Image (cartoon, helix red, strand yellow):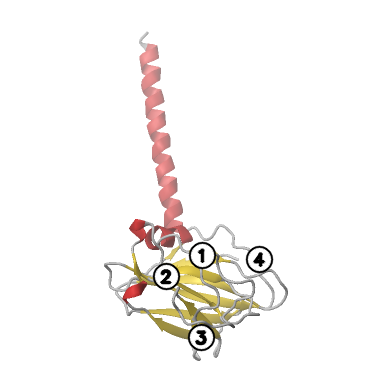
Amino acid sequence: MDIKVFDWQGNQRDLAYLQGKYGQFIIKPAADSDGTVYKISTLREKVDTAATLVVRVVNSDGAALDGVQMAWYWPDAPEDPDAGPLGGVLPQMRPNRCVSGWTNPNGDVGFGMGAGAYYFPQQAQIGPHAAWIHGATTRADVILGLGMIGGTNHDHFDVEFTRFEEDPGPPGPGPCPKDEILAEVAKIQAQVAETEASLEAIRELLADI
């Protein structure tokens, strides 16, 4: 399935936009198995905002899910032998470490971020935090690289998971916003016009020989 991306103004973008601004965060797909799975479905940029990263969980129809336990990781988080998810976390992470929170009736849970959440993408850094659906037997994507850009007023992006009864499959190439398509078309048209002008100049020179 495709992951939707929205910038801070609500415009739909792509993963390249977020990774260009927030660093090369990593998404580990949920473990292969049958049955219920939680997939990252939407990433929403937030700027000049509170130092809280909001994780939302919805079902496949988009309805909010109340009471879902979320895992919130950083390297020195408390030990939790049931942290999960099924298949484990990324190799560069310490397993079985997280705090957890439960979604409210709006499907949201907020995790506060302190000074340690700041990082500098221009120095090839990624954020220290990760998130997934809690539980050693839970099939869920893991996203690592969450945090706030250093020198900003808590700029970050929030994460939304969708619960599916069966795995919807790997992500596609992702959305390509209309304005980016039009800009690319205009660039190609300009290049064609420049080439045609050069060819015409060559024809005139040849005609004079």
Residue 100 in view in this figure = yes
Mark 1 or 2, nearer chain start: 1
- Mark 3 is surrounded, within 10 Å at the Cα level, by few (under 14), some (14 to 19) or many (20 or more) other residues, namely many
Query: How packed is label 4: few (under 14 Cα within 10 Å), some, or many (20 or more)?
Result: few
> Front-most of 106 and 67?
67
Closer to the chain start, of discs 4 and 1, is 1
- Label 1 or label 3, whichever comes before in sequence order: 1
Kindly identify the residue that appears in the image at 37 percent across and 60 percent down: 21
| Frontmost residue, 40 versus 11 | 40
Of badges 4 and 1, the one in the foreground is 1
Q: Nearer the viewer, mark 2 or mark 3?
A: 2
Residue 36 occupies quadrant: bottom right
Residue indicated by mark 1: 92
Give the residue at mark 2: 128
* Side of 194 relative to 62 (left or right): left
Q: CA distance from mark 4 to mark 2?
A: 28 Å
Amino acid type at image mark 3: Gly
What label does residue 107 carry, if any?
A: 3
**Distance (Cα) linking label 2 and label 3:** 24 Å
Label 1: few (<14), some (14–19) or many (≥20) C-alpha neighbours in 10 Å? few
Label at residue 169: 4
Residue type pointed to by label 2:
Pro
Say which of 43 and 186 sits in front: 43
Amino acid type, label 4? Gly
